Image (spheres, rainbow, N blue to C red):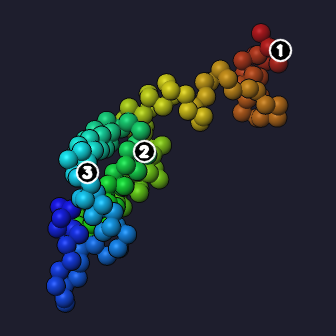
Amino acid sequence: FWQRAVAIPEPPAHPAITYGWYRDFLQFLINTGSSEWFSYVIVFGELAVGLGLILGVFVGLTAAGGLTMNLSYMLAGSASTNPVLAILAILLILAWRNAGYLGLDRYLLPAIGTPWWRPRCARSHTPGNSVDEGRVASAAGSTGEAR
């Protein structure tokens, strides 16, 4: 794939890679023989993104990893379905909290202690909050005294 991506065809045809810096990067990877170990990185990344999205684990980070891989393929000149998948990845990144309610993030994020998850007992009573005062009044009964 890299060999075909960096090839510059005879005019009037256009090269698959539009940006010279990305062609230089791929050529560097080819020249250093990185394809042997980089193929394992790609396979691991694709499996991690697939399993992460299916299971709903770290949805925002997983979608960002998928978007990074999609951008790499698009920069190399392979459009295919990648633009649609990139849009879906962006939507998942933007909706990661809602998307996490359907997967393992619902249980995983509170367990590891994220800043936006607070235990219910840690919430303090704020004076002047009519909702909390209504609960206190109903719990105290008609006399208004706390039991």
Q: What residue is at 19 percent from the left and 88 percent from the top?
A: 11
Mark 3 is surrounded, within 10 Å at the Cα level, by few (under 14), some (14 to 19) or many (20 or more) other residues, namely: few
Q: Distance from label 2 to label 3 (Cα)?
A: 25 Å
Q: What residue is at 25 percent from the left and 51 percent from the top?
A: 34
Q: What's the residue type where badge 2 is placed?
A: Leu
* Nearer to me, 100 or 124: 100
Which image quadrant is residue 56 in? top left
Q: Nearer the viewer, mark 2 or mark 3?
A: 3
Comes first in the chain, label 1 or label 2? 2
- Write down the residue under mark 2: 61
Comes first in the chain, label 2 or label 3? 3
- Image coordinates for residue 98, horizontal then vertical, percent: 45, 44
Whether pointer 2 and pointer 3 mark residues with C-beta atoms closer than 8 Å, the reply is: no
Q: Nearer the viewer, mark 1 or mark 2?
A: 2
- Image coordinates for residue 69, horizontal then vertical, percent: 32, 54
Q: What residue is at 79 percent from the left and 31 percent from the top?
A: 126
Q: In this view, which residue lies farthest toward the front?
A: 32
Q: Quadrant of the N terminus?
A: bottom left
Q: Distance from label 3 to label 1 (Cα)?
A: 74 Å
Secondary structure of the residue carrying tag 1 is loop
Would you say 146 lies left or right of 108 here?
right
> Is residue 85 in view?
no
Q: What's the residue type where badge 3 is placed?
A: Ser
Secondary structure of the residue carrying tag 2 is helix
> Is residue 121 in view?
yes
Would you say 36 lies left or right of 66 here?
left
Q: What residue is at 65 percent from the left and 20 percent from the top?
A: 121
- Write down the residue under mark 3: 34
* Nearer to me, 90 or 135: 90
Whether pointer 1 and pointer 2 mark residues with C-beta atoms closer than 8 Å, the reply is: no
- Write down the residue under mark 1: 145
